[in-house]
Image (cartoon, grey):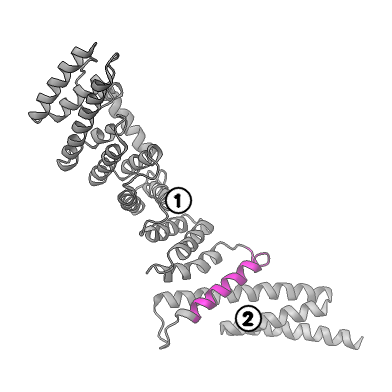
Amino acid sequence: MIVRLLLALLVCLSTGCASFNRPFGSLTGFSTPKDEAGVREALGLAAEDFTAGRTARALERALACRDATGLSSELKNDVEIRVEEYADRRIVELATQEQDPDELEDLIELNLPRQLAVRAGVAAAELLLADDEPFDAYEVLKKLDTKFPNHHERQRAGELLVDAGLELANDDWSFFGWFKTSDDGATVLEYLVVNYPSQKRCDEAYAKLAELYAADREWQLARERCEDLLLYHPESPLALEAEADVPHYRLRGLKSPEYDRRELLLARGELENWIERHADPSGTPGELERNVRIDYADCLTRLTRSDLSIAHFYTRIGERYGAVLHAERALEEARATDAAKLIAEASAAADRARALATENERE
């Protein structure tokens, strides 16, 4: 993003930033007519330009007439009719001839009727996306949403945002590890899921966001985006993997089994539900199921370690009830992992706890 801004600044400096001094892409500098006669003359010349196919020039003449003062209501109305007519044709020309999208973007600022301005903006975004400028396309669409909330082209705008966001998110370019293009992709996709929640491809956005956050080790954000996918798009073909990823990212985000038992129990329940609902009945698991079972074994191992740690503590201080409770639970969890070494360790801990209880009873 910063690199893009620096390049844009260099281009502006090299060209004298002429674009800063004009409100419309190809403005030729027509002056505002001084009176009604001047406006009528300008409109006549604009009509000749329009008939001759010089649509941009015709529009520029009509726009210059807008600033004239002292006009009758009828003449003001005529000026607006001409502006709209010429702008409509100009939008078609710029969009179909794949010309400079900046000219279409300029039309948004010309106080055109809402429908025309939105058409121009969406067409500009389409051209920018085709020109491999997905972030610029996003910025145009965001400008449209700000200026014209709930406009009539939101369905098409949502589709363009998905394409722009995914294109950026899948780009692995970075500047020595900084200013990653994929970060721009996350910005676009987050904007999409917040402002276009009913877009049918939001499930792709949630899945990609989870992937991006996981790559940055932002485990909670990754999990939350998977949960959003399941909540808003439960019938998505991506839901099965997202359901498996929720406990996976939950486990990845845990640092201390002693203090995160609640999260471990949540992960265990999620993994057991996944296995119960989706495990291959033939007993030949696919890659996704194998990964889920690996996470399940990891979760049970962590729960075992958590209980063993607590059982050891209670054994040391002679608290028989707590020692037996946690040692027995650790043994139950260890047996579910089928890990012989862990089972032996938990069994030894349970024996020590029972011995402590027996000693206390004798006393």
Side of 63 where 234 appears, left or right: right
Which image quadrant: the N terminus? top left
Q: Does residue 33 lie above or below 158 as drawn?
A: above
Mark 2–mark 1 Cα distance, whole angstroms, equals: 41 Å
- Which amino acid does the dot numbered 1 rest on? Val
Could you tell me which secondary element the residue under label 1 belongs to? helix
Which image quadrant: the C terminus? bottom right
Residue at the top extreme of this rendering: 34
Side of 286 where 57 appears, left or right: left
For mark 2, what is the residue? 333
Residue visible at 39% across and 61% down in the picture: 203
Do the residues under discs 2 and 1 have CB atoms within 8 angstroms? no
Q: Main secondary structure of the magenta part?
A: helix
Q: What percent of the width, then of the height, locates residue 285? A: 41, 82
* Circle 2 Cα neighbour tier, 10 Å, few/some/many (<14 / 14–19 / ≥20): many
For mark 1, what is the residue? 194
Side of 191 where 104 appears, left or right: left
Q: Between residues 359 and 30, which one lies in front from this camera angle?
A: 30
